[in-house]
Amino acid sequence: MLLLTIFAVSFPLALYAYYVGSQAFAFFEGAASFAFWFSIVGLVFLFPMRYVVSLFSKYIRTLRGSILLGSYWTAHLILYGLILEGIVAYSFRIHSLVSQLNVNLASIPIYPVSVASLLAGFAFNPSIDIFIPPVYVLALSFYTISISFIIAVLVLTNIMKVAEIGKMCTNAMRSRALVVMPALGVIGGAACCLSLPVLISLAAPTAAIFSSSPIVYYSAYFVFPTATAFGLKFNMDSTNKISSSMSKIVAQNKTNRKGQGFLAN
């Protein structure tokens, strides 16, 4: 209920940002965007990804988990930051001159005011613009931070869960493990880098930087990250089912061994 309330409040807060105008537009637009994406991420983790969150809380405590999360999250932030800068430059004809390392906070009002413009504001405003000489500019929004974090969490849980399954295979009875190995190969191959959606999400933003087509920019900014998240969630569901099956096999093997030991005695 709290998350739904925060989600509902984000829209009138964004409208109020247009009412106050340039004096405090960035502040109220930023508060609205933060409320919107905080509630979205919270609802995603609370419902479709509830079990993923429990896995994430376990894996992130390890050194490997922290490194995986940090590296994937950073990579996606950089790529999507470059894309947002490309969208701003293309849509508003704003060309950034990078002469020195600098960080700015920017918000661009989108008119006429409507539901569509408010949603666009949530996607683009405010942006933290990081100027890196001589030519690079990263524009980070609450959308890029949120979607990158969701993807990084899914990447981490996929990889760590596959590693757990591999460990269970070594402990399970060889004949049973060999039956499951082909399925593990599919899951492991998909989760390694991590599945086709992730490869697309990594490649598409880089390609978009060199393109003048707005469709490429917007696809790389909206379509590919969303496809990545859905693909990884589907992969995680499949991996989790295999993990449950393997746990049952391991438990059955332990029971059989105890029974054999009892009969031997």
Image (cartoon, rainbow, N blue to C red):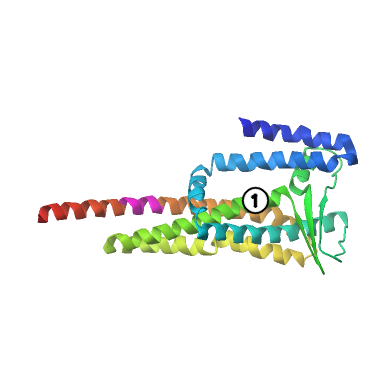
- The secondary structure making up most of the magenta span is helix
Q: How many marks?
A: 1
| Residue 95 rendering spot, x and y as whole percentages | 87, 61
Q: Is residue 101 magenta?
A: no
Residue at 15%, 55% (x, y): give it.
261
Q: What's under tag 1, amino acid-wise?
A: Ile
- Label 1: which residue? 147
123 shown above or below 161? above
The part of the chain drawn in magenta is 242-248
Point out the image quarter for the N terminus.
top right
Q: Is residue 226 at least partly visible in the picture?
A: no
Q: Which residue is drawn at 44% across and 51% down?
A: 240
Is 69 or 242 nearer to us in this picture?
Answer: 69
Residue 195 placement, left or right of 30: left
Whether residue 120 is visible to the viewer of this picture, yes or no, is yes
Q: What element carries label 1?
A: helix
